[in-house]
Amino acid sequence: MPESNRQTIHATSVAIDGRGLLIMGPSGAGKSDLALRLIDRGASLISDDYTAVTPLNGTLLLSAPPNIAGKMEIRHLGIVDIAHIEDVPAALAITLEDSPARMPETTPTFMLAGIALPLVALAGKEPSAPIKAEWVLRRILSGGGEP
């Protein structure tokens, strides 16, 4: 991919059915933990903790920065080698919050490199967080509207 437009953001990313999810939040919010639970449910790792984002033809491609490609921190176990994939088109941004709105009134977007992604707030440490992330992505991909 062209390096000139690439930027690196503080976000973990996974792919489900070939579509990328950016998982954002402060250190300790549970980004890697949510990614690990999604991987256990069939997702693929793109990148842990930092994600390289490249705009291309109106979409954002997600990859791992070379120095962390194929690595994931599993808290209390350390950094492990794990299969990963590259250049996955982004479909959804997730922000991890302690207490997201129970019934959000609007559907926000996250602007990155001039491209808008649907944005959903989740409590990443809740047991249902991976299922909610999958549900939102399915809804977006099926044309059922934004989250």
Image (cartoon, rainbow, N blue to C red):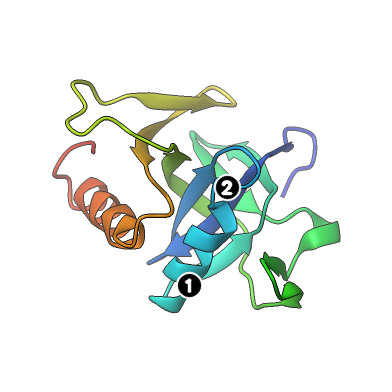
Question: In the rendered structure, which disc, 2 or 1, sits on the residue that comes first in sequence?
Answer: 1
For the image shown, how many numbered marks are present on the structure?
2
Examine the image and state in which quarter residue 68 appears: bottom right
Per the image, label 1 sits on a secondary structure element best described as: helix
Estimate the x, y position of residue 57 in percent, counting from the top left. Answer: 52, 36
For the residues marked 2 and 1, what is the alpha-carbon distance in whole angstroms? 19 Å
- Residue 102 drawn above or below residue 68: above
- State the residue in front, 82 or 87: 82
The residue positioned 71% from the left and 50% from the top of the image is 1
How many residues crowd mark 1 within 10 Å: few (<14), some (14–19), many (20+)?
A: some
Q: Residue at x 46, y 41 (%)?
A: 96
Of 87 and 145, which appears nearest the observer?
145
The answer to whether 104 is drawn above or below residue 90 in the figure is: above
Mark nearest the camera among 2 and 1 is: 1
33 displayed left or right of 38: right
x and y percent of residue 17 in the render? 37, 67
Tell me which amino acid carries mark 2. Answer: Leu
Question: At x 52% / y 68%, what residue is drawn?
Answer: 36
Q: Residue flagged by tag 1: what amino acid is it?
A: Ile
Residue that label 2 marks: 61
